[in-house]
């Protein structure tokens, strides 16, 4: 295969802080203060060990965190715990973007008053870069989580998990890629131990900041998956030009686009643990979406959907098993010969013969050469006595939107029977051709997540395709892989 598509993990490496012998703070059964602080370390989720060799360090822009919401759930177990409060992470708001080059975030955060009064276990959920997600803080005391204007107080983690996020964010300044808790050790939310001597809650901000040995670590992951296509192809040796084995094209430029990609995702990874590195994606009408509109000009008409060599594109996960809905990459290759771009080209295929013609004139010249030995026997006796110059006196070739070609042959000196036979020959020749505008051809690939899971796009992963060479004559229009 001329092109390899692999999944590389987008990771952040967390740094362990040195323990300090500090033990300040209250908990269940201790003094109940209105103020309550927690010492947090937020780090990116590491990739499963089975795929560690594919580690792809995240960029500073992908690491950047500009805002955040910390949610506290209470309950006997994670599955039954309900959302009680939510607060904006102050240090991110006061100094947005300051962590763009960091590999982890150490934050001392005030929680809602009364947090330590809860009698059950506490669980924590971090939502980061929420600008484009619909999450916000509101309510009378400004400590309720809202989603698209609706309060989520008393929701369970599964109800929050199932919320549909309309955007995974971007790497633009003060926006960032949306992140939330990653599966870790079989659970999503870390439990907050409020015991007096070993808990994570403190009376003061200073006490919490000093107790680095009692820092709660929350692993987060991006809802986005990164897709990148890089061109490494130059000389085209897989086919020749105009049937001349000494002439070959080179790649002028490569662009690419996505077909069947999700723009929506769950608020938290659904149906996965860190070990299996998989997820369940949103399905429904219009999801996934595609820009393709059968036609060679799709890349030109929809520039916002086509990308240059090496561009990074961020999309939501798509793990559907329905073949026709799986995410695909279209690669557009524009060819040239020497220093000259190719114009409209034609692929001729008849029997075992396949030739890539660089112009209509080259194809017609081939037809004239082959007339007496091959083409004359295609038609009725009315044309067999005609010369190649008479048959191909006034030819025209027209490339249709779907890449098919209409060949028209005319000669006003022919009688009615001869004209009808000439029309028949035109139709026959049309069926042997496919047309390529401006020397552009297309190749398509499904994204293969890994050997275990097969085709699929998973959040917090990077999929890097390297187009190493032109494997043959491609399609004249972007054509999805169907049922394969």
Image (tube, rainbow, N blue to C red):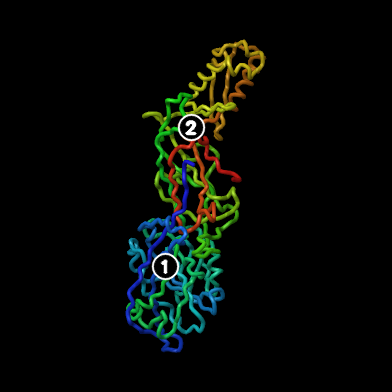
Q: Residues within 10 Å of mark 2 (few under 14, many from 20)?
A: many
Q: Is residue 16 left or right of residue 140?
A: left
One can see residue 377 in this view: yes
Q: CA distance from mark 1 to mark 2?
A: 49 Å
Q: Give the residue displayed 47% in from the left and 31% down from the top.
A: 239
The residue at the point 51 percent across, 66 percent down is 147
Residue neighbourhood size for the residue with mark 1, other residues' Cα within 10 Å, grouped as few (<14), some (14–19), many (≥20):
many
Give x and y (percent) for residue 22: 33, 82
Horizontal relation, residue 425 to residue 336: left or right: right
Q: How many marks?
A: 2
**483 shown above or below 108:** above
The label shown at residue 371 is none
Q: Earlier in the sequence, mark 1 or mark 2?
A: 1
Q: Is residue 223 above or below residue 361?
A: below
Q: Is residue 261 above or below residue 250?
A: below
Q: Position of residue 425 (x, y in %)?
A: 61, 20
Secondary structure at numbered mark 1: strand
Residue at 59 percent of width and 45 percent of height = 484
Q: What residue did someone put label 2 on?
A: 437
Image quadrant of residue 401? top right
Above-or-below relation of 234 to 163: above
Residue indicated by mark 1? 68
Q: Nearer the viewer, residue 298 or 453?
A: 453
Element assignment for label 2: helix
């Amino acid at each position: 295969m001329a092109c390899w598509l692999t999944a590389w993990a987008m990771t952040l490496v967390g740094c362990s802080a040195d323990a300090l012998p500090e033990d300040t703070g209250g908990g269940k059964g201790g003094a109940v203060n209105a103020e309550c602080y927690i010492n947090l370390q937020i780090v990116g989720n590491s990739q499963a060990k089975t795929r560690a060799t594919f580690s792809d360090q995240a960029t500073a822009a992908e690491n950047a965190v500009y805002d955040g919401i910390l949610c506290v759930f209470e309950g006997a177990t994670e599955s039954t715990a309900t959302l009680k409060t939510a607060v904006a992470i102050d240090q991110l708001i006061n100094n947005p973007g300051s962590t763009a080059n960091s590999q982890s975030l150490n934050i001392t955060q005030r929680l809602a008053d009364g947090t330590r009064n809860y009698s059950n276990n506490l669980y924590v959920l971090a939502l980061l870069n929420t600008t484009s997600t619909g999450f916000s803080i509101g309510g009378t005391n400004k400590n309720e989580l809202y989603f698209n204007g609706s309060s989520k107080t008393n929701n369970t983690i599964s109800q929050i998990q199932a919320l549909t996020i309309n955007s995974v964010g971007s790497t633009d300044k003060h926006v960032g890629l949306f992140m939330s808790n990653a599966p870790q050790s079989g659970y999503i939310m870390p439990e907050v131990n409020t015991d007096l001597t070993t808990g994570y809650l403190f009376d003061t901000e200073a006490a919490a900041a000093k107790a680095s040995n009692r820092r709660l670590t929350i692993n987060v992951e991006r809802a986005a998956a990164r897709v990148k296509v890089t061109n490494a192809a130059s000389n085209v040796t897989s086919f020749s030009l105009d049937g001349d084995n000494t002439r070959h094209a080179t790649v002028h430029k490569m662009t690419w686009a996505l077909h069947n990609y999700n723009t929506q995702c769950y608020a938290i990874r659904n149906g996965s643990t860190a070990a299996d590195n998989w997820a369940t994606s949103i399905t429904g009408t219009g999801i996934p979406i595609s820009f393709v509109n059968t036609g060679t000009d799709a890349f030109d008409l929809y520039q916002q959907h086509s990308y240059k060599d090496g561009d990074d594109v961020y999309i939501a996960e798509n793990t559907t098993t329905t073949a026709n809905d799986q995410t695909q990459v279209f690669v557009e290759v524009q060819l040239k010969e020497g220093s000259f771009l190719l114009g409209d080209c034609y692929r001729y295929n008849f029997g075992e013969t396949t030739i890539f013609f660089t112009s209509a004139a080259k194809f017609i010249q081939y037809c004239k050469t082959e007339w007496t030995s091959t083409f004359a026997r295609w038609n009725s006796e009315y044309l067999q006595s005609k010369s190649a110059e008479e048959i191909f006196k006034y030819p025209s070739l027209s490339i249709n939107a779907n890449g098919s070609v209409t060949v028209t042959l005319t000669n006003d000196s022919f009688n009615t029977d001869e004209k009808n036979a000439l029309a028949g020959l035109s139709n026959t020749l049309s069926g042997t051709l496919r047309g390529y505008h401006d020397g552009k051809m297309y190749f398509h690939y499904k994204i293969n997540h890994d050997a275990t899971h097969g085709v699929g796009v998973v959040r917090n992963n990077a999929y890097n395709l390297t187009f190493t060479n032109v494997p043959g004559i491609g399609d004249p229009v972007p054509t999805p892989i169907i049922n394969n």
